[in-house]
Image (cartoon, rainbow, N blue to C red):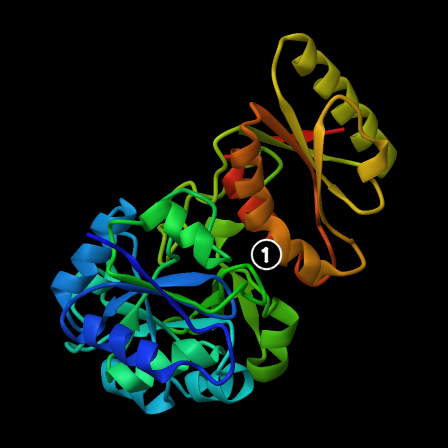
């Protein structure tokens, strides 16, 4: 299979390319497309065969549910049952945008799309290409991130091509994404709105709209770097994700101690013939030795760190390093989302100093 790259990065959007991609979806094929979070790998959410193709292309476990992307609130009503009032409140506040709601499903969306669950995860992306594709195709689009399962999520079309070339029909190239981390996922099937995956929309923002919000114990890490082991209800809760090829360790502590420790570890690894990478901020990058240092962003600009995280991990793959040491990024607003992804990429491997 030859994977077409359709450039829709310029305004106005090339509607002919949107139509080509729409025909692929309507015929049961797969198309990667940009959202404001990461690139998604899309198929018709109501077509169980298309969902099976998504799992196969990614090498993704079939019990890991897919998110259904819609363009109108009415579509959420069409595929759900017992929809709570909180769904409309959250949609009015955050849609289109990086918020996914988990609700009870009806028969419209097959179990192949929901990973065998009686719930369905749904969001409305805030990206003109994604919305045009949904509207033009007439399909609600099931779409996980458009990468090989376990690899860093794609924030550029080139990342998608690297992982999925020859496995899918087309990639809509809309340029680099805005946010760079997957959507916040909330469970609306319980009495209290529950965060299943942190993202750009944080607990404080949600609480302002619906009142009490809690964090699922399955994503809260304790001092040992493990969770309470709750049953996963959403994409990304069960499996290791976002991992670079090199062994990644997060070093957590005061700035001076972190830098001293990373420099010592880098020196020891280099002496053993290993190639070392370090993830640093613009303020600390010049203080590291014996390593290839990549700047992830500025702590004062949390979104820069989120935006660059996956791209940095993929750059280290290209540099063919053996080990990576990263600073911790527990920033005020997006820190929980950033660290959720970084911990998964490191397999929870953290060194406290």
Residue 332 on image: x %, y % = 74, 59
- Left or right: residue 224 compared with residue 116: right
- Which x, y percent locates residue 264? 77, 18
Q: Is residue 56 left or right of residue 199?
A: left
Q: Mark 1 falls on what kind of element?
A: helix
- Where is the C terminus found, in terms of image quarters? top right
* Residue located beneath label 1 in the image: 337
Q: Relative to residue 165, is residue 332 drawn left or right?
A: right
Number of dots carrying numbers: 1
Quarter occupied by residue 86: bottom left
* Residue that sits furthest to the top in the current view: 272
Residue at left 14%, top 65%? 48
| Rendered location of residue 4, percent (x, y) | 30, 61
Front in this rendered view, residue 335 or 193: 335
The correct choice, above or below, for 262 with respect to 168 in the image is above
Q: Nearer the viewer, residue 76 or 156?
A: 156
The answer to whether 85 is drawn above or below residue 130 in the figure is below
- Percent across and percent down for residue 228 are 47, 44
Left or right: 182 as drawn, with respect to 27: right
The answer to whether any part of residue 309 appears in the image is yes
**Where 266 falls versus 139 (above or below)?**
above
Q: Nearer the viewer, residue 62 or 221?
A: 62
Task: State the residue in front, 132 or 202.
Answer: 132
How busy is the neighbourhood of tag 1: few (under 14 within 10 Å), some, or many (20 plus)? many
Residue at x 42%, y 40% (from the top left corner)? 240
Tell me what residue is drawn at x 50 percent, y 35 percent: 347
Which residue is rendered at x = 49% and y = 61% of the image?
182
- Asked whether the viewer can see residue 336, the reply is no
């Amino acid at each position: 299979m030859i994977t077409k790259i359709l450039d829709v990065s310029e305004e106005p959007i090339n509607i002919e390319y949107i139509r080509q991609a729409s025909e692929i979806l309507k015929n049961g094929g797969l198309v990667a497309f940009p959202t404001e979070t990461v690139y998604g790998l899309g198929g018709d959410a109501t077509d169980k065969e298309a969902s099976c193709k998504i799992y196969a292309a990614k090498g993704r476990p079939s019990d890991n549910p897919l998110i259904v992307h819609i363009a109108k609130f009415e579509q959420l009503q069409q595929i759900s049952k017992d929809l709570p009032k909180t769904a409309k409140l959250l949609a009015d506040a955050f849609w289109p945008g990086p918020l996914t709601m988990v609700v009870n499903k009806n028969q419209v969306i097959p179990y192949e799309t929901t990973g065998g669950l009686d719930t369905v995860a749904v969001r409305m992306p805030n990206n003109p290409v994604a919305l045009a594709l949904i509207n033009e195709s007439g399909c609600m689009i099931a779409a996980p991130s458009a990468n090989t399962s376990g690899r860093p999520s794609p924030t550029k079309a080139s990342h998608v091509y690297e992982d999925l070339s020859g496995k899918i029909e087309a990639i809509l190239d809309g340029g680099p994404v805005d946010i760079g981390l997957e959507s916040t996922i909330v469970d609306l099937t319980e009495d209290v709105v529950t965060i299943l995956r942190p993202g750009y929309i944080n607990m404080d923002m949600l609480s302002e709209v619906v009142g009490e919000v809690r964090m699922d114990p399955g994503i809260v890490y304790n001092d040992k770097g493990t969770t309470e082991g709750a049953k996963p209800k959403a994409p990304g809760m069960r499996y290791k994700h976002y991992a670079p090829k090199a062994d990644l360790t997060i070093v957590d502590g005061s700035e001076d101690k972190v830098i001293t420790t990373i420099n010592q570890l880098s020196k020891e690894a280099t002496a053993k013939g290993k190639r070392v990478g370090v993830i640093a901020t613009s303020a600390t990058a010049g203080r590291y030795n014996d390593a290839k240092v990549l700047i992830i962003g500025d702590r004062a600009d949390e979104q820069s760190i989120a935006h660059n995280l996956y791209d940095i991990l993929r750059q280290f793959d290209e540099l063919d390093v053996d080990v990576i040491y990263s600073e911790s990024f527990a920033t005020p607003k997006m820190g929980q989302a950033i660290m959720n992804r970084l911990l998964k990429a490191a397999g929870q491997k953290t060194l406290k100093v």
